[in-house]
Image: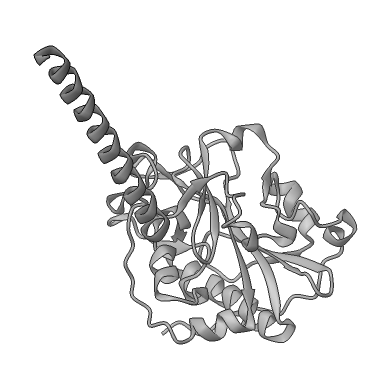
Amino acid sequence: MKKNSCVSLRSLSVIVSLLASLVISLILSFAGGVITPTVSNAQNTACLHHFAEQKAPVITKPTLQTKTLGLCFEAFAVLHSAVSHTPLWSAEHLTRDSLRAAREVRRDDQFHAEASLPQEDQAQLIDYAHSGFDRGHMSPAADMPTVQAQIESFSLANIVPQNRQNNQLLWSAIEGATRHLVQQRGELFVVTGPVFEGEKINRLNNRVFIPTHIFKAVYDPQTKEAGAWLAPNEEGNVYQAMSVAELEKRIHINLFPAIPESVKLRAMDLPEPRIRQRR
């Protein structure tokens, strides 16, 4: 009788332990959905609305696919590379309503390492410290329609090392031109990201790759038009406006997989960035 009691108590202990683990798992799962981004291939149902025709960008160069992970945030999605310690692309769906809401959100710069990534894959604040480079948003903070979305935009998973003048002048103007285009047209799907060209890529802290160029591609689902800006990651106001097909060939990413090639081959008329004078 005593032996059976011991077995019963042991079984009860195991059941209680399993239930406790299940409860903790559920709590962490819920917290992860609210506080941290969903870790996936960026194609889960929570993320599909960020992409044109619900299709995420596709890497077409095998070497770029190494150690990548999709992250789904409230107002944008990224494909993060543990090799470059940067996003390879950051996608968002902008509308007049979302930009109207974004104007009401007070900016609060809170850059942070992305806790949902393995620690060795994360860029860290120390990587950027005293580097002379800005922490450049790919999906801009000014696009974020809620406080939570803006907080998420300061994740280093959405950041690349950017030339300070480029970030604050030319690239800021390109972001502004994109928002102006949304106001004119009603909505755009946007994909932004870094380009790493050449045999040797410079790094911050021997870890974070420094882009040679930065791109921003846009697609208007109403008029079926698309176009892109491409700018060197350096001081100056030089940039190119081009077709999405031309950009995709250069960066080895199919930015809008569901869009016909005929649309990608025609470069839409993009507004000229209005570059403010440096103070």
View extreme (right): residue: 262
* Scheme of image coloration: one colour
Judge from the rendering whether residue 115 lies leftward or rightward of residue 184; answer left or right: left
In this view, 120 is above or below 247: above
Q: Which residue is drawn at 27% across and 51% down?
A: 126
Q: Is residue 158 visible?
A: yes
Question: As rendered, which of 175 and 151 lies closer to the eye?
Answer: 151
- Residue 13's spot in the image, x, y percent? 19, 29
View extreme (front): residue: 1
Q: How many marks?
A: 0
- Residue 38's spot in the image, x, y percent? 47, 51
Q: Which residue is drawn at 13% across and 18% down?
A: 6
Q: Which residue is drawn at 55% across and 73% down?
A: 170
In this view, 193 is above or below 227: above
Q: Is residue 215 visible?
A: no
Quadrant location, the C terminus: bottom left
In this view, 110 is above or below 105: above
Q: Residue at x 33, y 62 (%)?
A: 111
Judge from the rendering whether residue 140 lies leftward or rightward of residue 187; answer left or right: left
Question: As rendered, which of 98 and 31 lies closer to the eye?
Answer: 31
- Residue 272's spot in the image, x, y percent? 69, 79
Quadrant location, the N terminus: top left
- Residue 185's spot in the image, x, y percent? 74, 82
Question: As rendered, which of 18 and 203 lies closer to the eye?
Answer: 18
